[in-house]
Amino acid sequence: MTTESLPMTLPARYYTDPEIFRKEVERFYFGRWICGGRASLIPNPGDYFLCEIADESVIVVRGASGEVRAFYNVCRHRGSRMCTELHGSLPGRRITCPYHAWSYGLDGALLGAPHAERPGFSRADYPLHSIRTEIWEGNVFLHFGTPDQSVAEMLAPVSRKFANWHMAELRTHRRIVYSVKANWKLIVLNYNECLHCPFVHPELNPLTDYLGADNEPPDPAYIGGVMFLRNGAETMSFQGSRNGRSYLPGLTEEQHNWAAFYSIYPNLLLAPHPDYLLTHTLWPKAPNLTEIVCELHFHPDEMARPGFCADDAGGFWDLINRQDWRIVELSQAGIASRAYTPGPYTKREDLLCAFDRDVLAIDGE
Amino acid sequence: MTTESLPMTLPARYYTDPEIFRKEVERFYFGRWICGGRASLIPNPGDYFLCEIADESVIVVRGASGEVRAFYNVCRHRGSRMCTELHGSLPGRRITCPYHAWSYGLDGALLGAPHAERPGFSRADYPLHSIRTEIWEGNVFLHFGTPDQSVAEMLAPVSRKFANWHMAELRTHRRIVYSVKANWKLIVLNYNECLHCPFVHPELNPLTDYLGADNEPPDPAYIGGVMFLRNGAETMSFQGSRNGRSYLPGLTEEQHNWAAFYSIYPNLLLAPHPDYLLTHTLWPKAPNLTEIVCELHFHPDEMARPGFCADDAGGFWDLINRQDWRIVELSQAGIASRAYTPGPYTKREDLLCAFDRDVLAIDGE
Amino acid sequence: MTTESLPMTLPARYYTDPEIFRKEVERFYFGRWICGGRASLIPNPGDYFLCEIADESVIVVRGASGEVRAFYNVCRHRGSRMCTELHGSLPGRRITCPYHAWSYGLDGALLGAPHAERPGFSRADYPLHSIRTEIWEGNVFLHFGTPDQSVAEMLAPVSRKFANWHMAELRTHRRIVYSVKANWKLIVLNYNECLHCPFVHPELNPLTDYLGADNEPPDPAYIGGVMFLRNGAETMSFQGSRNGRSYLPGLTEEQHNWAAFYSIYPNLLLAPHPDYLLTHTLWPKAPNLTEIVCELHFHPDEMARPGFCADDAGGFWDLINRQDWRIVELSQAGIASRAYTPGPYTKREDLLCAFDRDVLAIDGE
């Protein structure tokens, strides 16, 4: 066997070239289902949240009959953004433009357009531009184009695998937003191997064996696997303790002993734990800049219990996150060097090779 | 009548494309008369102010015989900028370069060039590069090329309309500079309709009827109209009171009852009020960034009166300005969306259509 | 003689055009010897410092046998930067990547690559990418390509001229880093004439006659000359006093009476003084942005003397530096004007013409 036959990392341009970045955002983010956030954030008709992808702002809103819809945050009159709060409830269940008070129903229909009425003008011509949505396991997915399949079809194996978690029932307890000076794909790569864990995350070693991962064969829509907890560790948190929290109801004994880490392409990192669900969503801003939203979700019964506290798990992941962001920022800086050449992946980095292959296929380079 | 026949807003590229922006600055700002500031700021020979347009710095200076001249702020020796204070008086009535002390007269002639004398060198070869000026109603206009007509000719109808204001006699009382994340043309559009007033400026409603504007037919050099004050309102200020100030001398009874809002292309917004003159000048910095200088000018007799105070008018306009800048920034953000498409103008936005037509004509797109 | 025959400054594009800048950095910085810093900063095996040129980070390290080597700061595995402190000592005399602990010897050889061993993988295939080094007079020079000649050959005349300074023996006392909004070449131009001194540096006049420079004929590798100290001035410092410091050992009486200012292309400004050595290194960041490292170096015996103080010299040069940076920033701004045209050099600016000719030759424009 020769050196040539080793799988190698991608050329630098995939992490630095603005044109490849532009295409990649177009294809990966505007051309596939992406995860916008949790549906439980908007329980009642008229509740909404915004999500921003590249220069786009999207209003995700709960409709009158409980359905979730999404619209571009762009008034059909003079183009103004309408909602400005990241999260809220729409007065009168209408989206109203602050500029000239054009107002739209929760289904996007133009309901009012002061002084606009004249021959040739019809409100029916100016509904909000809508974006397709689908709720999967409590997450609102968005598609800016026309999907080939539903999220439910695409992620059926993941649904089955984590059915016992009843992820849709969980509620968000903690949310932290990070701005990381690295390409979004370096964050996916970092997420999918624990070979770096002993060096980057000394706090992980007492909780899991970094060689103890059990990865699934890669799927076109995701990659991932499980990590077994060491004897004595109950979950991933400071000291590995659940800190009085119950296991999530419905898990088997075996499911008490591991945490899973799945990258759902392109932007959802999904990590079911014995007593909570950890998610990251990735929002590319530039070839070398990504915004990351990290959330921890718990069972509502647990959250309602007096004395509920999850600072041990939240603080733990904030620490691990920051260690990862530092190292991916160093990766980004080094890969930008004229001296960088693709390097050899080890056997422990097979998921990364699979992701790189998917990137090449989708980037069409 | 079909939808197609409605006048529509411009495509997004006119507000976002760097190349269109570059051409537009070239044609609108470097190819036409622009307003640099008030001549009364430099009453005495050697007084000067700087104005910056794009990357250019211009020295506007009062000459020995009282004439106003303008020069590029670039030394003919090694190219250094010479004046650095925004406003001041030149020592010895010379523009002196701080690098090697080349010095120039108020007419731009090179007067001193230490150690430069040698065969082949003649001071006459190195005067400052000059820029054409004209004073119109107390405002210094600049032309970086060769004008087709004088400002006086171009704006004769405006001069006639506001002759009673004797604008040249007014003096600047208050100046505020804003940096607004929006294309300069969105600020012109915002200025030329009051349809947004009930929603954006609740404080305006007691003072004027937002439907009570009387617009002139558009002129190639400007657009504008008057707004009538409501009964009880004396001017535009908090509470609509003149706060003890006299009307400007020379106004008719009828002229006590309105304020006018004129956009003199490209960068002067001129607003005669019963007791003051309000001006804005617009300085494009990027497709989505504009610096705005807002000034209020009063009669010198009034300003000399003991107890003169104009905080009511100044504070009022600062509030109205900030409300406008917020909404044009939302416009800019929304227009940059891939979902934005031109929207239908209402009848109350006729001046905006006229401006858009002028933009298309001058941009030559 | 006509105006045309006067030597003129370069066209603006050499100071503003991003493409010319890119080429120039490639040719001047990545295609020639550049000065990275003082070898005395890393006395022991495993000591290192980083230097950054454009987007590159370079590790300069003292090897086991005392030799100085340089490597790109890029791990051969996944490309991460490895060293992050500007200056330090490597634990275990190894460069270890913080990501997956690949480790390299002081000669760049890959010594450890956890979990990487498998058929087809050989550590010998993945040494660090190295950069050629040479020590000249105590300065570490770097060459990113293949040099035509050694630094010693290239700078032999400078070595001879300043042999009595024994520059390699001197030690760094003070280091200040500046960020200057000007093209790096404007800093070289500013350094090579004192015509600006009376206007920019009033504090210099009591110490030297600005017309008293004695310039060498330009060399392809450097330009420079000496400035004689006025009677009563012992060195360049506040009040011109050595503040109790001895002259550097080995200087002649005559060498007590001047300071020299040499631009070693492209980035070392070398200024031997009677009691210290002043150096600047220039690090281009953008057409209009340069980072400058200024250091003062003294004799170790002098530095070891109780009560040694050099604030008079250090503070003096900090003042002079800041005066220069302000004026080159004004130059940069003015040269960017559409009105800028090349201006006539005076006889006192002959070195600048020589430098400009070298720039044109190397830029190949």
Image (cartoon, coloured by chain):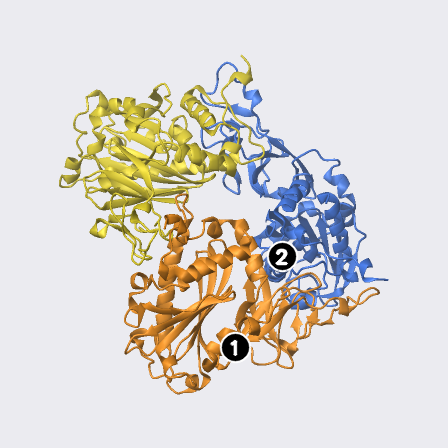
Chain colours: A blue, B yellow, C orange
C235 shown above or below C73? below
| Residue A6 placement (x, y as % from top left) | 80, 59
Q: Is residue B34 left or right of residue C136?
A: left
Q: Amino acid at mark 2?
A: Ala
B360 shown above or below B70? above
Looking at the image, can residue C278 be seen?
Answer: yes
Tag 2 residue: A336
Q: Residues within 10 Å of mark 1 (few under 14, many from 20)?
A: many
x 51%, y 37%: residue: B19
x 58%, y 68%: residue: C142
Give the chain of mark 1.
C
| Residue C161 placement (x, y as % from top left) | 46, 77
Judged by depth in the image, the label closer to the viewer, 1 or 2, is 1
Task: Give the secondary structure at mark 2.
Answer: loop
Residue extending farthest left:
B306
Give the chain of mark 2.
A
x 22%, y 46%: residue: B46
Looking at the image, can residue A83 be seen?
Answer: no
The front one of C135 and B237 is C135
Say yes or no: labels 1 and 2 on the same chain.
no
Residue extending farthest right:
A1
* Picture quadrant where residue A1 is located: bottom right
| Residue A114 placement (x, y as % from top left) | 45, 23
Task: Give the secondary structure at mark 1.
Answer: loop
Tag 1 residue: C137
Q: Amino acid at mark 1?
A: Glu
